[in-house]
Amino acid sequence: MGKLFYLMGKSASGKDRMFRLLITESDLPLDRLVIYTTRPRREGEEDGREYHFIDETKLQELRDKGLIIEERTYATVAGPWTYATVADEALLLRRRSLLGIGTPESFCRLRACLGEEAVVPLFIEVDDGTRLQRALDREKRQAVPNYEEVCRRFLADAADFASEKLAAAGIDRRFDNNGDEESCRRELEEAIRSVLR
């Protein structure tokens, strides 16, 4: 069975960008871990690529079948949005290693379900000023920008990614993505290769 490499970081830290680079522009033997969400699709996202976009009814069906490994619901300014990792074939029958994105909380739940050695944390760190500017720039490109949600997420990240939570989860290595994106990608790639050797 392969490993699950789990990218984490505060909003606008570059997780999605690093994910795309590692999946599409490297020769790493990684498949995507695609989780489920009730949040609306952003411009440019495709169902089954970034997320499986579902409604509350489908989410409840997955719960009723006992397929949810972990889920998180956020009280956004647009209403509640849930993200969930589902015990589907892609996750449980890992013939190749997977690359996923989540939070320290979801990392801990996945590690408890799949085993300590199966889930490898990759934490991307960016200073707050850079993150806030990136988040504002990204939101500005949306058809209907939601700056209130940008602010809510920015403030919520302080609690979700507090140093004591990272330490308790055993997330001690950090990958700097403040400027040189290529350097961050190379460091992440080398960390993954070292585990796969």
Image (cartoon, rainbow, N blue to C red):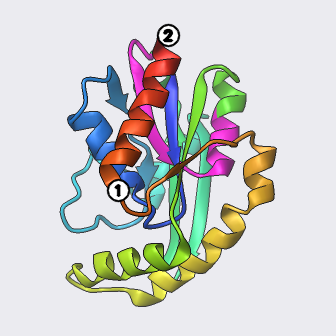
Q: Is residue 53 visible?
A: no
How many angstroms separate mark 2 from mark 1 (CA)? 33 Å
For disc 1, the neighbor class at 10 Å (few under 14, some 14 to 19, many from 20) is: few
Q: Quadrant of residue 142?
A: bottom left
Q: Secondary structure at mark 1?
A: loop
- Residue 177 image offset from top left, x and y in percent: 44, 57
Q: Are marks 2 and 1 in contact (CB under 8 Å)?
A: no
At 51% from the left and 85% from the top, the residue drawn is 151
Q: Which badge, 2 or 1, comes first in the chain's sequence?
A: 2
**Viewer-nearest of discs 2 and 1:** 1
In the rendered structure, does residue 176 fall within the stretch colored magenta?
A: no
Which sits in the foreground, 17 or 106? 17
Say which element carries label 2: loop
Find residue 175 and report its horizontal and vertical position in percent.
52, 48
Q: Residue farthest to the bottom?
A: 148
Q: Which residue is mark 1?
A: 180
Q: Is residue 97 magenta?
A: yes
Q: Name the residue carrying label 2.
A: 1
The stretch of residues the image draws in magenta is: 94-110
Asked which quadrant contains residue 63, the reply is top right
Report the residue at 69% width, 42% height from top: 171
Q: The residue under label 2 is which amino acid type?
A: Met
Callout count: 2
Q: Residue at x 58, y 69 (%)?
A: 74
